Image (spheres, helix red, strand yellow):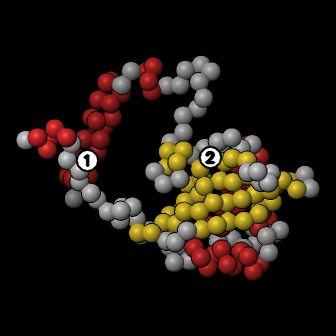
Amino acid sequence: MRLIKILILCFCTTIGAFANETIPDIIRRPQRGEAPRYPEDTIIGSLGRGTASLASYSFARNFLNAIVSKNQNAPILSDVGTILIKEILEKLAPINPQRFRLGGGREEADGSISFLVRFMGREEWMAGELYIRFEEEEWRFDDLLLEEARDISAGEDGYRFDFSPYERLF
């Protein structure tokens, strides 16, 4: 077992060094004045702040952290209401979320800010949309719409292999 761990470590180190040599610095590092590069989630799209303000993005992250940690006494949840928090936690209970991903925010027509979110458990995930609103000089929770839970190992429509046009000719 120890030999396998050593071999894996050597392989990862070699691949990491090889990747650093083959990818030029101009591609790996953002240039001056270039917008930061954020990773993308295949379900909810690009991660990061999006067009939302930093304050709204921070509020959304803190709110979701409290939800995932199931901390009903968190100060950020104090304005939401016990019944609503329990409903959200009950909807998320089947997947037992361990972490979340927060997509870029955008301003809605009614003035609220919406964020796409994905909660991930060990075997299932659930996507949704978080709405927050700026009232009385602070950000407040407005709504959280959640989809049905989905299995992590299953693809959207399952795996479908489609031959390229060149392979069809042969």
> Which of these two is toward me, 124 or 12?
124
Q: Residue placed at 67% from the left, 48% from the top?
A: 105
Callout 2: SS: strand
> Which of these two is toward me, 108 or 125?
108
Q: Quadrant of residue 27?
A: top left
- What type is the residue that disc 1 sits on? Ile
Quadrant of the rendering where the C terminus is positioned: top left
Q: Is residue 79 above or below residue 22?
A: below
Q: Nearer the viewer, mark 2 or mark 1?
A: 2
Q: Tell whether 139 sits left or right of 96.
A: right
Q: What is the x, y in percent for residue 168? A: 14, 44
Using the image, tell me which numbered label, if any, was put on residue 104: 2
Q: Is residue 41 above or below residue 16?
A: below
Instruction: Name the N-terminal-most of marks 2 and 1.
Output: 1
Q: Residue placed at 63% from the left, 75% from the top?
A: 89
Q: Is residue 44 above or below residue 147?
A: above
> Which of these two is toward me, 72 or 159?
159
Viewer can see residue 62:
no
Q: What is the x, y in percent for residue 95? A: 50, 73
Q: Residue placed at 51% from the left, 78% from the top?
A: 94
Q: Residue placed at 61% from the left, 79% from the top?
A: 90
Q: How many marks?
A: 2
Q: CA distance from mark 2 to mark 1?
A: 36 Å
Q: Tell whether 71 sits left or right of 122.
A: right
Q: Tell whether 115 sits left or right of 10.
A: right
- For label 1, the residue is 8
Callout 1: SS: helix
Viewer can see residue 152:
yes
> Which of these two is toward me, 56 or 155?
155
Q: What is the x, y in percent for residue 77? A: 77, 67
- What type is the residue that disc 2 sits on? Gly
Q: What is the x, y in percent for residue 54? A: 73, 43
